Image: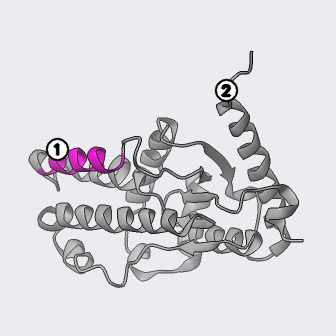
Amino acid sequence: MMLREKYGIPSDSIITIAGTVGVGKSTMTKALAEGLGFRTSFEKVDTNPYLDQFYKDFQRWSFHLQIYFLAERFKEQKKIFEYGGGFIQDRSIYEDTGIFAKMHYEKGTMTKVDYETYTSLFEAMVMTPYFPHPDLLIYLEGSIDDILDRIKERGRPMEQQTPVEYWQEMHGRYEYWINNFNACPVLRININEYDVVQDSGSIEPIIQKIAHFMEQTKRLKSPVKI
């Protein structure tokens, strides 16, 4: 019996994985998709026409990059719901505006006019009753030391050259963002509670926790019968 059926997770569920760089979103996406028999949705980095220019000149290309991400994530979200659900999504559409665009504006690498244009477009597209929000957002969390260890372990050259202060700031921004997030239900999972790379069986307790959380959330949303 598939774990989805064992724990009663609806086959049309949309689950989004969120968390800072290095926390293991892609690994969790793959493990959950395999355990539940769901499709995956990953960020398309290789086809991004602005990424290289952005890293060379943040101020010139930050607005272009964020608009591109917004459009691509919006299209992906629509596609997922047109399929009828059954997806695990790596990274949410909400992180772009709540963390990255906001950070560029506050650091001066995005103008006030561009930031206001971007956030206005985001709110018109996403923060409405008509946008298909996920059934659940899983937030992967850990201490900054745990995150730095993971970044070091996976050894990506660009990340190794990035100052530790950047990761510390990003960690803090993610914590602030998730503490104020309310677009859909949030389940927090600490990265020290599992190791799906070394122990594939550790995904089952997570799926059980997801099922319990979704059932509790469903009950809270149900109208009270008089």
Image point (41%, 51%), residue name: 94
Relative height, residue 226 to residue 205 (above, below): above
Q: Amino acid at mark 1?
A: Glu
Q: Amino acid at mark 2?
A: Pro
Say left or right for 155 vs 27. left
Magenta stretch bounds: 114-126
Say left or right for 97 vs 13. left
Residue sitting at the far bottom: 46
Say which of 50 and 212 sits in front.
212
Q: Quadrant of the C terminus?
A: top right
Which residue is denoted by mark 1 in the rendering? Answer: 116
- Is disc 2 surrounded by few (<14), some (14 to 19) or many (20+) residues within 10 Å? few
Q: Quadrant of the N terminus?
A: bottom right
Secondary structure of the residue carrying numbered label 2: loop
N-terminal-most mark, 2 or 1: 1
The kind of secondary structure the magenta stretch mainly shows is helix
- Residue 38 place in picture, x, y as percent: 67, 71
Mark drawn on residue 223: 2
